[in-house]
Amino acid sequence: MLTLFRWLLRIFTGLIGLALLATLISYWFLSRSLPDYDEDFTLQGLNAPVEIVRNNDNVPHIFGKTDADVFYALGFAHAQDRLWQMTMLRRTAQGRLSEVFGTRTVKIDELMRRYDLYTHARESVAVQDAETQAALEAYASGVNAWIEQVNLGARGRGAPEFFFFSNEIAAWQPADSLAILKLMALQVSGQLGDEVLRARMSLLLPDARLRDILPDDPGSGIAALPDYASLVPGVSPSAAPLRIAQDVLSPFPRRETAGASNAWAAAPSRSAAGGSLLANDPHLGFTAPSIWYLARLELQSGGVIGATIPGVPTILIGRSEALGWGLTTAYLDDQDLFIEEVNPENTEQYRTPDGWKAFETRRTILQVKDAPPVTITLRWTENGPVLPGSHYDIGSVTPAGHVVSLGWTALTGKDTSMTAALHLLKAKSVAEAIEAGKLYVAPAQNLMLADRNGVALQMIGAMPKRDARHQTQGRMPAPGWLAENRWQGSFPYEENPRFTDPVSGILGNTNNKIINRPFPEHVSFTWGDTQRIQRWLTLMKTREVHTRESFIEAQLDTVSPTARTLLPLIGADLWFTGEAAPEGTPERLRQRALELMAKWNGEMNEHLPEPLIYQAWMRALQDRLIRDEIGPMADEFTHIEPIFLERVYRNVEGAAGWCDVVQSAVVETCADLARIALDEALLGLSETYGPNVESWRWGDVHQAAQDHPVMGDVPVLRYFVNIRQSTSGDDSTLMRGVTKGSGPNPYLNVHGAGYRGVYDFADPDSSVFIISTGQSGHPLSRHYDNLGERWRQGEYIPMSLDPDLARAAAVGDTVLTPVEVAE
């Protein structure tokens, strides 16, 4: 027996030793791709030496004698830290994910090929001005210089992820950078999905109830639209939920995450220090690493510092010595779906205002890993590309004998948005920045600006011009063969909304409605916010003058105006009803929850139970209100719809009718449903988190899910590559943390401010910024998540253009030397 034990011990010890050895070998191979930030390089393609000083937070400060060399070095730095992320963004835009991930991503690639973003990107290279083309070429050369170093120097294939996939890294091209910009346009454009949803819902509900569940921004005064069934005969109502790609690799947005952001600015007259202020925090889906990468470029026109997107050679949001700029999604209605009638005598033709016309067609082949290639026939009409009925559930609103095409401002080979972005870097004033925006095409953005003298908000992006007789005003799919439904070009840039130096001295946008112009001069019927703007107005009005700190305070504010509005309405008949119920009963649990809620100020603090009770209650209530009316389509409303709930509980235009459950004989009141929903929510929470209400904690479920999009679901690895953090806020707070809305934990924080910046032109070098993860995309790097905890705690890092501060305690100083000089 003793001998057996000894042998088992030896075997066990041997296995442990082998496991440790395998771990060490794996670590050695994976760590080979960690760059040495003090290593110098001699490279082709440079005009003169370039210095990359990485400050203590690994933010590269790039100094060169020419702008081309600076962009070259930015490409080199991006590739050092984010090569895997860059190649994934490129593959997504090209529709080539399936070459790596197999059949899992075929549907994603298929739709991307139909959008044809990469073809448009290639065509757009030629329309950039000479300076921008030079920047794109130099940047691509810098990326390729690092790829060459990886291939020649046994640098661990450039990133750990490449060990899991055998595909070669193709050379970077200028079109790749433009394609990534178009991919970002796709990720913040949600009008397509809105059109399908509205059409589907109009088939299920009368017009009055449709206005409840898909309300317009209050005060917009929209005329009633025609019923979709009468507009497009042959479409049957269906309560089946919409089918939108849910894969973590999918770039197609759901409507609750189709772009967002905050930006506000104060003129010198409203600043305590006498200089303009600007704050910006763009909201996108969380990933590890963040989509944002901080950098400083020392151009011939001066220094610029802020946030870049790896793969794109510009500072998209940030500041120079003289100017600061931020971006928010404009929610411009820049997408329209067109119902195209196919010729029954010749399916290669479709109807136009001038008769039948042949589709423009082209075949493309998807290479699929471990599966046969897939051949797709791409088709275009005069209105845009034909989309498959399987995406966004387009097939459910398409009658037999018809197809659907998409009109979208981003689908052009004459997109000069990149030129506009580079011109913005060199602008010295608000007026020059507004002029630079004239060349911008897509995606539509609100450009918030501040210089030393004033502030402005300018919407940039092409505004489609529609006929006043358009049958659906662009809100639902419309017959594409009718001239009145087709686009008539774009409005002049001067027609885009613009606000400069307001009398109040304060400008702000939280994706709220910015202008109330009648159709067709309108911007949109659908806006991204009706709630955050209310809290922002309150905070701005509480001070006569503002400071950098007050702007930071607003960025980090977690008070929910939605909770403050809805709870008194919905709980009006539930507060303080009777004596205390016996312990252990549902009634007592309800009373304890209501006691907490009565004292709560609406702050969605991660350490409190009230936010969790509120969210669970509103979710349960909303589902009960709508599910018996629209069936499984209720699954599309996964987030609290504040205006809907307020309409119901104020009984606006008879909206209280939603409270009566159609399928029951009893006539339920809204108070009945509020009580039933609260009990249901509390029962679910107590089963999951225990019966002690006071011990529940919002931050335990509202964790920022900054997950690796490829390895984030791999057992064991996910603990090393995913970044999870307890967070405050929710869908409607200024410090926005959009909940997932579905799955085992619907409260997971999946979308928010991956970047925050506050710029103070009274003392520009006191400006600050932060991103939500770290600069490196390498999970073994200490810079993979080192900024994440500071981001979670509401801290920032300096945004200085002082070279001496950059060099102080720098983590590395790299010099790139041209081959000619070295010889």
Image (cartoon, rainbow, N blue to C red):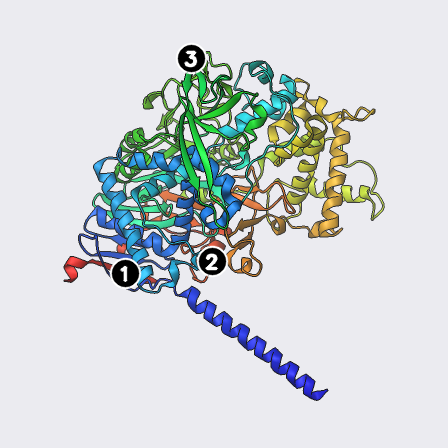
Left or right, 510 with respect to 577, comes to left
Per the rendering, the mark at residue 814 is 1
| Mark 3 surroundings: few (<14), some (14-19) or many (≥20) residues within 10 A | few
Helix, strand or loop at mark 2: loop
In the rendered image, residue 83, in percent from the top left (x then y), is placed at: 38, 53
Q: Residue at x 55, y 59 (%)?
A: 719
Q: According to the image, label 3 marks what residue?
A: 353
In the rendered image, residue 783, in percent from the top left (x then y), is placed at: 42, 59
Q: Which quadrant would the N terminus be assigned to in this image?
A: bottom right
| Gap between marks 2 and 1 measured at Cα | 29 Å
| Observer-nearest of 711 and 58 | 711
Residue type at mark 3: give it. Answer: Pro
| Mark 1 surroundings: few (<14), some (14-19) or many (≥20) residues within 10 A | many
Q: Are marks 2 and 3 in contact (CB under 8 Å)?
A: no
In the rendered image, residue 385, in percent from the top left (x then y), is placed at: 43, 28
| Observer-nearest of 163 and 531 | 163
